[in-house]
Image (cartoon, rainbow, N blue to C red):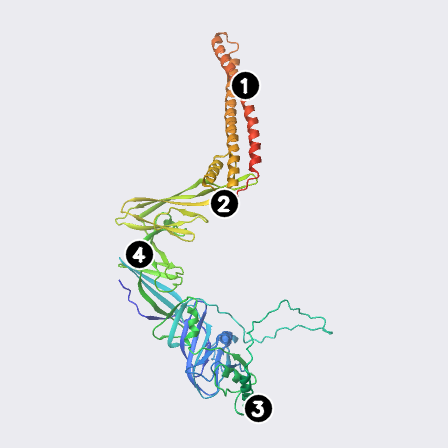
C-alpha cells in the first residue's frame, strides 16, 4: 500500500500578524529561506543594483538580528568584497509605514528603520543574508506497515508569518537549533571608565585581572639588498595627500582594508553620521547556511523552488523511503492507560536509515486496511531504532510478579578489626504471557531497570537501554510463555566475624589468593583462631539451650511432685518423678560446669582473635 502524496501542500490558516516584512531592499528579491528549530530563519536576497548605496528598510523589532547577522557578497569578484561598509540608521529620512487598519493601535516596534550600505558606484550583483524571527518548522511522519517491509515518509510543516510572500523561493529546513542570541547592537553603549583622583593616588575602579594577547613572532630583518629596494619603493610612492587626490585611501582607512583583502580601490567616503561595520564575507552564499550542517545537524533542501504565501502554512514532503522495521507488540504499562497493565500495545519498530536526525513529532500508521493509529517518536539519531505504540492488543495477557533476592558474599574490606562484605541483591521479575490469538506473536517486554543494577544472563537479543531493557520473546497461538529477568547490584554491609556470611567471604578471599602473601597468611592464622572461637561459641549456645530445657523440665517435675505430695496412692508415680528430678539435676550440674569452661576458653580465644585481626588491613576490593 502507498499513500498518495504531493510534494507540497499549502494550508491557508490566516496566520499573518506582522504589519510588514522584517527586511526589504529595493532591487534585492527574496530567493532563499532556511528555517531552524529555534525561532529564527535565515533569509537571502539577491539582485542587480547600480549606484553607490543600498538602503534596507528594517522593522524596529528586527533591527538587532539584522545588524548581528547581516552578511553580503558580490558575485564573480567584487569591489566591495571584505570591505568596511557604512551601516547606519538615518534619523532624518524615515520611510512611510503601512497604513493602520480601522481601530488598530500603532505599534512602535513595527516602525521601519533605514540601514544604508555604501558602495563604490557602478553595477553590482549582490547577495545579502540575515536572520529574523520565524516560527519553528514542525515534522510529521507517516509509517506504512507491510508484510516484509516498512515505508517511512517525513513531512515538514512551515509557517510563513514574515509579512511578505515567499514566491518561487529555495526553501530548506534544518533539524537543529543553533545558538541565536538577542542582541542590542542598535543601542548606544558608553561603558564606565575608572576615575583618577587628584594626585594620581586613588582609582575608583581597580583592575582585577590581566589579559595577555597572543602575538605572532617578529619577522626576520630583510637582507641588505631587499632593504634598499624597499627604501627606493617608499620614495617613489605618492604621499597621503596625493593618494587622496588620486581617489585612493590613506593607510588605515576603509580603502586600505579593502585592498588588503583583495578589494578594489575608489570606495566612496563614509557619511559623517555613519557608523562603519566590518563585515567578513565569503564568495559562495551557500556557505552561510551550510554552517548548520557542520555540527552534524540534518538539513533538508527542497530540490525545486516553492511559493509560500504570507499567512499560510505549507506541508512539504521531505523524504520518502523504505527502512528496516517490523510490526510487533510491546508490554509497557502506562498509568494513563489502565488496560496496558495487563495487555501489550501494538507497535511498529523501525530503524532510522534516513542519513540524519528525526526530530520529535507525531507519527501516523497505515496498513493494508488503511489507517491503524497514531503515536509519537522522540528525537531519533541516524542508525537508532524506535518502538512506537499505536493501539492495545486484547488477545495477549501478561502477569508480572517480583521477588527480592540476596545472594553470595564477597570480602570487600578489613579495616580496624571490622569486616565489610559485599552481597549481590536485586529483583527477580517473573513475566507470564498468555496468548488467546490464532497467530504467532513477537512481543517485546519493556522492563523498568533498577538504578545501578546489571542484568544477569538476560534472554537472547535483549536491548539494555538507559533506565529500561527491551526483552524479546515469541508466543505461539493459544500458548503460555514465562520469562524471568534477574537484576543484581553490589550491596556492602558490616558483618559479624562469627556469621556464616563472614566465613563464606573469607574462605573465597583466601582461596582466590587476593592481596599480598603476608596479609593472606596473617588473615588465615587469625581466621583459624576465629574458627576455634566459633566452635566454643556454638558449643556454649548448645549448652545454654540444654540448660534452659533441663531447667524447664525440672520446674515442671517439681510442680508435679507438689501436686501429688499428699496422695498416698501415687507413691509409685512420686518415685518415678523423684528419680527423673535427680537425673536432671545431675545433668544440669555437668552442663553448668562445662558452660563455665566454654565461656572462659571462648573469651580467651575471642581476645586472641581480636588482637590478631586488629593489625590486618585488606584494602577495599574493586
Mark 2 lies on a secondary structure that is: loop
Q: Which residue is mark 3?
A: 241
Q: Position of residue 234 (x, y in %)?
A: 55, 88
Label 4 CA crowd tier, 10 Å (few <14, some 14–19, many 20+): some
Comes first in the chain, label 2 or label 1: 1
Determine contact: label 4, label 3, CB under 8 Å: no
Q: Nearer the viewer, residue 551 or 59?
A: 551
Q: Are marks 4 and 2 in contact (CB under 8 Å)?
A: no
Mark 4 vs mark 2: give the one in front. 2
Q: Are marks 3 and 2 in contact (CB under 8 Å)?
A: no
- The residue carrying pointer 2 sits among few (fewer than 14), some (14 to 19) or many (20 or more) residues within 10 Å by Cα, namely few
Spatial distance from mark 2 to mark 1, Cα to Cα? Answer: 49 Å
Circle nearer the N terminus (4, 3): 3
User: Can you tell which of label 2 and label 1 is closer to the viewer?
Assistant: 2
Using the rendered view, name the quadrant where residue 173 is placed: bottom left
The residue carrying mark 1 is 589
Q: Quadrant of the N terminus?
A: bottom left
What residue does disc 2 label?
Answer: 621
Q: Is residue 589 visible?
A: yes
Q: Which mark is residue 475?
A: none
Amino acid at each position: 500500500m502507498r499513500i498518495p502524496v504531493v510534494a507540497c501542500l499549502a494550508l491557508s490558516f490566516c496566520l499573518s500578524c506582522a504589519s510588514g516584512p522584517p527586511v526589504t531592499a529595493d532591487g534585492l528579491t527574496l530567493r532563499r529561506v532556511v528555517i531552524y528549530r529555534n525561532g529564527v530563519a535565515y533569509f537571502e536576497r539577491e539582485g542587480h543594483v547600480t549606484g553607490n548605496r543600498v538602503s534596507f528598510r528594517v522593522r524596529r523589532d528586527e533591527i538587532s538580528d539584522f545588524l548581528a547577522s547581516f552578511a553580503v557578497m558580490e558575485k564573480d569578484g567584487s569591489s566591495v568584497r571584505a570591505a568596511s561598509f557604512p551601516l547606519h540608521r538615518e534619523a532624518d529620512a524615515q520611510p512611510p509605514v503601512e497604513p493602520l487598519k480601522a481601530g488598530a493601535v500603532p505599534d512602535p516596534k513595527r516602525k521601519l528603520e533605514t540601514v544604508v550600505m555604501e558602495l563604490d558606484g557602478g553595477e553590482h550583483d549582490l547577495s545579502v543574508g540575515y536572520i529574523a524571527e520565524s516560527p519553528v518548522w514542525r515534522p510529521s511522519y507517516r509509517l506504512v506497515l507491510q508484510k516484509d517491509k516498512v515505508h517511512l515518509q517525513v513531512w515538514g510543516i512551515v509557517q510563513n508569518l514574515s509579512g511578505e510572500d515567499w514566491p518561487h523561493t529555495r526553501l530548506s529546513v534544518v533539524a537543529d537549533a543553533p545558538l541565536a542570541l538577542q542582541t542590542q547592537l542598535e543601542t548606544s553603549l558608553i561603558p564606565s571608565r575608572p576615575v583618577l583622583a587628584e594626585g594620581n593616588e586613588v582609582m575608583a575602579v581597580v583592575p582585577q585581572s590581566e589579559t595577555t594577547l597572543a602575538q605572532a613572532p617578529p619577522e626576520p630583518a630583510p637582507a641588505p639588498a631587499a632593504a634598499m629596494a624597499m627604501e627606493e619603493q617608499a620614495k617613489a610612492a605618492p604621499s597621503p595627500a596625493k593618494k587622496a587626490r588620486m581617489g585612493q585611501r590613506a593607510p588605515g582607512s576603509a580603502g586600505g582594508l579593502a585592498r588588503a583583502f583583495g578589494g578594489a580601490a575608489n570606495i566612496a567616503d563614509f557619511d559623517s553620521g555613519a557608523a562603519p561595520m566590518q563585515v567578513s564575507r565569503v564568495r559562495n552564499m551557500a556557505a552561510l547556511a551550510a554552517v548548520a550542517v557542520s555540527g552534524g545537524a540534518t538539513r533538508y533542501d527542497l530540490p525545486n523552488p516553492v511559493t509560500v504565501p504570507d499567512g499560510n502554512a505549507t506541508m512539504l514532503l521531505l523524504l520518502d523511503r523504505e527502512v528496516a522495521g517490523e510490526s510487533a507488540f510491546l508490554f509497557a504499562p502506562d498509568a494513563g492507560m489502565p488496560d496496558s497493565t495487563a495487555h501489550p500495545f501494538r507497535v511498529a519498530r523501525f530503524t532510522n536509515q534516513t542519513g540524519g536526525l528525526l526530530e520529535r513529532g507525531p507519527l501516523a500508521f497505515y496498513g493494508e486496511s488503511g489507517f491503524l493509529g497514531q503515536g509519537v517518536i522522540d528525537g531519533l539519531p541516524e542508525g537508532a531504532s524506535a518502538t512506537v505504540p499505536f493501539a492495545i492488543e486484547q488477545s495477549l495477557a501478561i502477569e508480572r510478579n517480583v521477588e527480592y533476592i540476596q545472594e553470595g558474599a564477597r570480602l570487600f574490606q578489613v579495616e580496624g578489626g571490622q569486616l565489610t562484605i559485599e552481597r549481590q541483591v536485586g529483583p527477580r521479575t517473573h513475566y507470564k504471557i498468555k496468548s488467546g490469538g490464532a497467530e504467532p506473536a513477537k512481543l517485546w517486554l519493556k522492563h523498568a531497570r533498577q538504578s545501578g543494577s546489571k542484568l544477569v544472563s538476560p534472554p537472547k537479543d535483549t536491548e539494555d537501554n538507559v533506565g529500561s531493557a527491551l526483552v524479546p520473546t515469541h508466543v505461539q497461538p493459544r500458548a503460555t510463555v514465562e520469562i524471568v529477568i534477574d537484576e543484581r547490584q553490589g550491596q556492602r554491609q558490616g558483618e559479624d566475624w562469627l556469621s556464616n556470611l563472614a566465613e563464606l567471604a573469607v574462605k573465597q578471599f583466601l582461596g582466590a589468593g587476593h592481596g599480598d602473601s603476608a596479609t593472606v597468611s596473617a588473615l588465615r592464622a587469625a581466621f583459624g583462631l576465629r574458627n576455634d572461637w566459633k566452635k566454643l561459641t556454638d558449643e556454649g549456645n548448645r549448652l545454654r539451650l540444654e540448660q534452659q530445657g533441663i531447667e524447664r523440665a525440672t520446674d515442671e517435675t517439681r510442680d508435679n511432685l507438689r501436686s501429688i505430695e499428699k496422695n498416698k496412692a501415687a507413691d509409685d508415680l512420686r518415685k518415678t518423678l523423684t528419680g527423673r528430678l535427680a537425673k536432671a539435676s545431675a545433668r544440669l550440674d555437668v552442663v553448668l560446669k562445662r558452660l563455665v569452661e566454654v565461656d572462659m576458653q571462648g573469651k580467651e580465644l575471642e581476645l586472641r582473635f581480636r588482637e590478631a585481626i586488629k593489625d590486618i588491613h585488606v584494602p577495599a576490593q574493586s
